[in-house]
Amino acid sequence: MKKLLLIVFLYSNFINAQQLAVDNTSKVTIENGASINISGLKLAPSSTYDITGEITISKSETPVTTSNGTSIDRVYNSSTAINNFSGEITFFYEDSELNNTSANEADLKLEVKETPSGLWTPYTGTINQTLNSISFTFSSINFNSITAVDDGATLSIQDLETVFGKVSIYPNPTTSLLKIDSDKNLTFELYDLMGKQILKTKNHTINLTHSPNAVYLLKVNNEDLKISKSYKIVKE
């Protein structure tokens, strides 16, 4: 397919492109409050964001398959990493793209191949079954591929327990304090299920006493390896 060279400044609320290709002398600027939709992948940054060349973002209909699972038949790939993106990413899909893996729409998770680790990381986003979309708001992320999988599947491509190191999180569910045991250099980010960051800390004890009873996502970052794992935390 012939590449679409898009060299624009985005002042409108929304713009569509079948494929985004930027050369090394150009950039795409997405202003705060604006968004870009690349054939069903919508990027809406929380502040003005530049996509700089040389980079191509395109959609593939070939699912990602590993020994641990298979994605739906829609995968977005970027030729170079999209770095330090903060804001909402919305992934649109067709019902037909769920069929091959018998994915349950209500249980979809967003899977993001983060860089530089090369690991697929699941995110529990907001699903809109009317619009056929799943959205998640990131505080900051580096990635070069994104897709969606059923909740029962995972696209992990290496043994995180070996690479990441053992992490013990307890008690879970918790009514007050959440404790994390590890001998690695870790930081912790806690999110609600809408993707809003609640805290970021290096403290291995997190006080949830005054937090509402709910399900949260704890992102554990290995600062030395620059990789992360996510855990579901229940406050009751």
Image (spheres, helix red, strand yellow):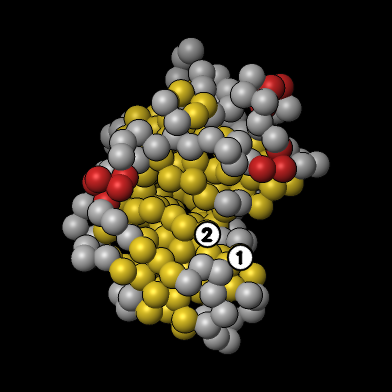
Q: Amino acid at mark 2?
A: Lys
Residue at position x 58%, y 51% from top?
124
Q: Is residue 201 visible?
A: no
Location of residue 203 in the rendering, given as x and y in whole percent from the top left corner: 32, 78
Q: Which is more toward the observer, 174 or 7? A: 174
Residue 148 x/y as whole percent = 56, 36
**What residue is pinned by disc 2?**
232
Q: SS of the residue at dot 2?
A: strand
Residue depicted at 63% across the width and 41% down the height = 108
Are the residues at dot 2 and dot 1 in contact (C-beta closer than 8 Å)?
yes
Identify the mark at residue 215; answer none if there is no mark: 1
Q: Quadrant of residue 150?
A: top right
CA gap between label 2 and label 1 equals 7 Å
Q: x and y percent of residue 69 in the render?
A: 49, 29
Name above or below for residue 108 compared with residue 17. Answer: below
Q: Residue furthest top?
A: 1
Q: Left or right: where does residue 21 sit relative to residue 31?
A: left
Q: Which mark sits nearer the N-terminus, 2 or 1?
A: 1
SS under mark 1: strand
From this viewpoint, which residue is outermost toward the front? 171
| Residue at figure coordinates x 40%, y 49% from the top left | 50
Name the residue furthest right: 130
Query: Which quadrant of the figure has residue 130?
Result: top right
| Residue 128 location (% of width, % of height) | 74, 46
Q: What amino acid is labelled 1 in the image?
A: Val
* Residue count near mark 2 (Cα–Cα under 10 Å), binned few <14, some 14–19, many ≥20: some
Q: Is residue 26 left or right of residue 138?
A: left
Residue 105 is left or right of residue 221, and the answer is: right
Number of numbered markers: 2
Residue 37 versus residue 65: which sits nearer the camera? 65
Q: Is residue 22 above or below residue 160?
A: above
